[in-house]
Each structure stands twice: as structure tokens, then as C-alpha cells.
Amino acid sequence: MANLNQYLIMSAAPDAPDFSNGLFISACNVGTTVGAAAGGVFISQLGTPYVNWVGILSVMLGLVTILYRSYMLFF
């Protein structure tokens, strides 16, 4: 999956492949940081019994985002 995302980013800016690759790596790092911070906030506020529910909500949010993006590609 990461290779497909990297290909899409690189093809969006073929004149600046180094810049595109840097954006890809930065986006991955920001996603990891935001995910860890959000997980830490949920655990500190709700406790560990709610980790499964937060995981389910995260998966649902991811699916909605994927469906929205695929809808935008066709229209």
C-alpha cells in the first residue's frame, strides 16, 4: 500500500521527485505522531477498557475517508 501511495504522490509532481518523496515521508511521520497522540489522549481520559471502542471508531473513520476519496476520484 505504501508503494502505491508513494507512486501516486510521485506522479502528481514528476518534475520534483525528491520533494514529492519528502512530502510522502513527512506525511507518514505526521500520521504516526498524530495517531500516537490521539491514542494517548483517549487512554488517559477514558482508560484502557475503551481501547477496543476507539479502535472500532478509528476503523470506521478510515473506511468513511476511503469511501469519500474513491467517490471524489469518480466525480
Image (tube, rainbow, N blue to C red):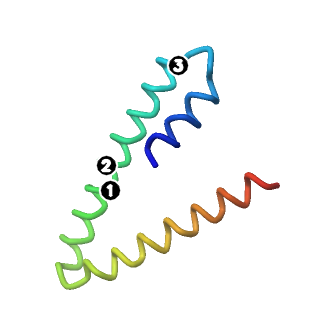
Q: Secondary structure at mark 2?
A: helix
Amino acid type of the residue tagged 3 in the rendering? Pro
Residue 71 rendering spot, x and y as whole percentages: 73, 61
In the image, what residue type sits under mark 1?
Gly
Asked if the residue under mark 1 is in contact with the one under mark 2, i.e. CB atoms within 8 Å, the reply is: yes
Residues at marks 1 and 3, CA–CA distance in whole angstroms: 27 Å
What residue sits right under mark 2 in the picture?
A: 32
Query: Are the residues tagged 2 and 3 within 8 Å (C-beta)?
Result: no
Say few, some or many: other residues with alpha carbon within 10 Å of mark 1 (under 14 / 14 to 19 / 20 or more): few
x 62%, y 23%: residue? 13
Q: Residues within 10 Å of mark 2 (few under 14, many from 20)?
A: few
Q: Is residue 17 above or below residue 7?
A: above
Q: Residue 21 falls in which quadrant of the image?
A: top left
Any mark on residue 17, and which? 3
Q: Is residue 54 left or right of residue 18?
A: left
Q: Position of residue 31 (x, y in %)?
A: 37, 48
Q: Residue at x 43, y 44 (%)?
A: 2
